[in-house]
Amino acid sequence: MVREVPDKVGLDGLEQRYDERWSADGTFAFDRTATRGQVFSIDTPPPTVSGSLHVGHVFSYTHTDTVARFQRMRGKEVFYPMGWDDNGLPTERRVQNYFGVRCDPSLPYVEGFEPPHHGTDGKNVKPGDQVPVSRRNFIELCERLTADDERQFEELWRRLGLSVDWAQTYQTIDATSRAASQRAFLRNLARGEAYQAEAPGLWDVTFQTAVAQAELEAREYPGFFHRVAFHCPDGEKVYVETTRPELVGAVVALIAHPDDERYQALFGTTVTSPLFGVEVPVLAHPAAAMDKGAGIAMCCTFGDLTDVQWWRELQLPTRSIVQRDGRLSRETPEWIAAGPGADLYAAELAGKTAFSARTAVVDALRDSGDLDGEPVKTQRMTNFYEKGDKPLEIVTSRQWYIRNGGRDYEGRDLKAELLQRGKELDFHPDFMRVRYDNWVGGLNGDWLISRQRFFGVAVPLWYPVTAAGDVDHEHPIVPAEAELPIDPTSQAPAGYTEDQRGVPGGFVGDADVMDTWATSSLTPLIVSGWERDEDLMARVYPMDLRPQGQDIIRTWLFASVVRSHLEKGVLPWKHAAISGWILDPDRKKMSKSKGNVVTPMGLLEEHGADAVRYWAASARLGTDAAFEVGQMKIGRRLAIKVLNASKFALTFGVDPQTGTGEIVLDPARVTVGIDRAMLAGLADVVEQATEAFEAFDHTRALEVTESFFWAFCDDYLELVKDRAYGAGTAASELTDATVSARTALAVALDVMLRLLAPFIPFATEEVWSWWRTGSVHRAPWPTARPLREAAGDADPLQLTAAGHALAALRKIKSEAKVSMRTPVLDATMAVPAPLLAGVTDALVDVKGAGRVTGPLELVAAAEGQGNPDVQGGIVVTASELGEPPARKPKA
RNA sequence: GGGCCUGUAGCUCAGCUGGUCAGAGCGCCACGCUUACACCGUGGAUGUCGGGGGUUCGAGUCCCUCCGGGCCCA
């Protein structure tokens, strides 16, 4: 039933209109009565709310949405929640600045706390002026502040047309997520998968927190090689080359490769360190690089990860001098205090940063004659915390770990299990799998999850304080799961009262929070209702799809696999769809500092959502895409074309008297060869698009659909125009040929709208609203079968042939520089044999569309006549053009 | 140093398991205001498929090597 086709069609305002309608109609609401087999569930990345919106968001989320819409139309009940990631350092900073507070976990929770500021006009409140608040209060403030960010994101997503179920949202810091995160941790603990250890680990001195292997970033860092002398008992000198001479005071051994001829005689002997005179052994270890520097290295506790390896494997003593704040210890260490360097240390090194200590040590070495030559400039890869700007130190501390296959785990080869999980996961594109394999294969330690920060999900433990006042870390006090989430820094464990906090015989709360990944790795469980709504869980978990960026395969993806494997013994999802980066036209990553960032909302306003989606959907998964406004313009054109072509196709269904009409979508009424040929071609397109979508190749689905659609408009529509208009308007006067054309147009339109709906949801929905009921996004995905049945034995080539014949006629007019309306009085056309039947069959339509008023003679093309690339080799060999029609005066 | 991806018309990219694969769109040139569309239509030009070897009857398509981009891990 055609209700109403607007006289003027357009895209403006469609986003708002249909967003409202979809919300009101619950078009994307998840029907939780669906069973697992009927559901397609998506574990969407929760965007960082305190981060900025950028085109990368629009890009990758569009990829996911096309899949969601496809699956929904295929009849799946799509579970597509949205989360907000507000857990972590960026939010911590924003809350501090916005409200003028800082988190102090030692403080008690204050009911009804009101912060001193509400927005500080862009000015940071000085740390000294910030009001300290408890962690619970801090979290509450975070939730208040991020509500605003969430609104902005939601507005953007709605404008973009993400078919998310907005009734299903979560925050990574909300009570549900905190409870899930703590529960998962406690279960890891109970099963022995979480453990604490006092061990040397990577440490960021700026944020003063431990850092996990996954958060490392190796960067080029400038430094100097210093040639430093150690002394043999016989007075000989052994030179090492080091970039960190300030650690001479922390040296525990000199180490060379066992095969290194130069040092064979020294192995097993001892040498003394310069300045401090500490005696250390010379040892052999294969990790020493013979070709680097002098080939012999000074092993300190701890300069880098190799030191840790030597220290562990060679069972060396610990002589730490760098503290958690990145400064050398203020007390003179005992092994130095007794030696010749005690005064030097006390006067020049104690309490200094590593950087200034280095200068002091180098000066002292130069004075003592233990520095050979001057330091030589070098660039070397150095480990940084990804959010930090000072090189990481290695300090010894007590931390919590979750097993992830990085270390041996008695009785269980967890690494092999996780590698196996990786094999079971379908990566799209498949080559992204190697990033997972490489990462898991290269792990050399378990997952350090405790962070010495304040804002985040608390490690849900307390520790008894002994009668002597010592904290007993070995016997943590564990809360009951029903109590979760808890904040051990402001709540007392069962059986204790708050006034026993920190006193002998009492308790202390663990002050640390967990790594943000420790919570976000649980998103599949959190959204699925784990231990909260097991009925939902059974309907959606394990999930179908995890879309995400390639940069976080080692973090989010891997950690999610670990948690799901440990907790549920399954993969969290079947498929992982990995999106690429957005590059600016110089093939550089878009970045704020380059000033080439475009705000996504601005883009949507300028080009329209369908246009922006088209650009995004044109890029394949896993492939970096250029930011191209041109591509958006093409998308906009496609959307407009869909409106206009639809308008045309539907005019034949409208009774001019009433303005409404009935279109019978009965393929049996399609009787003319070329109409059937068109449907046969469309059937191929349906099959290809479906196959592509099933393989997560949305780009190919778009491409085949789009190119068919344009050919449909350019050729088919023109060819059947005359026939479709027919002689009269009354149904009784219509010939079968006219009915065939009109029906084929409507059937094709109906199918193409559905094929395009995942890409340009607004334009297709608009057209759908003119003549169909409900939403196109809940309409069934088309199948080839009815089209094939209608097409019978028709060959798509027939339409191709007729299209080429029409183009050949257009060409002679184009070359004669006359209007396309110019009549052709007489023409002869040479047609290659394979196309001859098709052109002959469609001769009436070809003549009509080409305005051939006289005879059009078809002859078989001779061998070598015509270029197959131009109009399929069809050539008009003779023609007589009539008078061009008079130009209409301009209105 | 190891690994992955990538290099096809001026631009952005398709080209699956080797045999109409030398393509599309944009841009460009020319023409045309044809009642679906000027946010348009029609026609046209454009490439030693990064270089060099090899396998093959036949290679953008497989192998080797070199060069150039991007990324990951050491």
Image (cartoon, coloured by chain):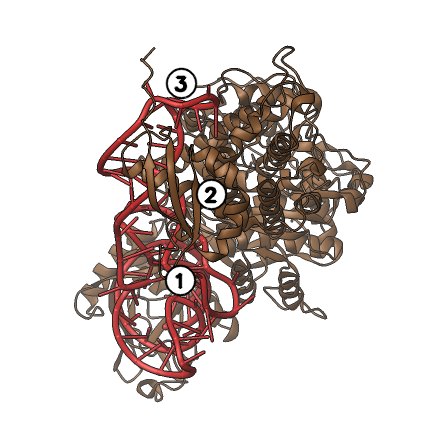
> Residue B69 at what x, y percent from top left?
31, 56
Per the image, the residue denoted by label 3 is A121
Disc ID at residue A303? 1
Q: Earlier in the sequence, mark 2 or mark 3?
A: 3
Task: Kindly indicate whether the residue at mark 1 contacts the one at mark 3 (C-beta within 8 angstroms).
Answer: no
B9 on left or right of A92:
left
Mark 1: few/some/many CA within 10 Å (<14, 14-19, 20+): many
Distance from the alpha carbon under mark 2 to that under mark 3: 64 Å
Residue displayed at 17% across by 65% down? A374
Which element is circle 1 on? loop
Which element is circle 3 on? loop
Q: Nearer the viewer, residue A481 or A551?
A: A551
Where the C terminus of chain A falls, by quadrant?
A: top left
Disc ID at residue A803? 2
* Viewer can see residue A180: yes
Q: Amino acid at mark 3?
A: Asp
Q: What number of labels is visible?
A: 3
As drawn, A763 above or below A809: above
Mark 2: few/some/many CA within 10 Å (<14, 14-19, 20+): many
Q: Earlier in the sequence, mark 3 or mark 1?
A: 3
As drawn, A95 above or below A474: above
Residue displayed at 33% across by 88% down? A261
Where the N terminus of chain A falls, by quadrant?
A: top right
Q: Chain of mark 1?
A: A
> Residue A668 at what x, y percent from top left?
72, 38
Q: Earlier in the sequence, mark 2 or mark 1?
A: 1
Chain letter for the part of the structure drawn in red: B
* Disc 3 versus disc 1: nearer the observer: 3
Residue A889 quadrant? top left
Look at the image and give the colour of chain A: brown
> Residue A104 at what x, y percent from top left?
55, 32
Q: Amino acid at mark 1?
A: Gly
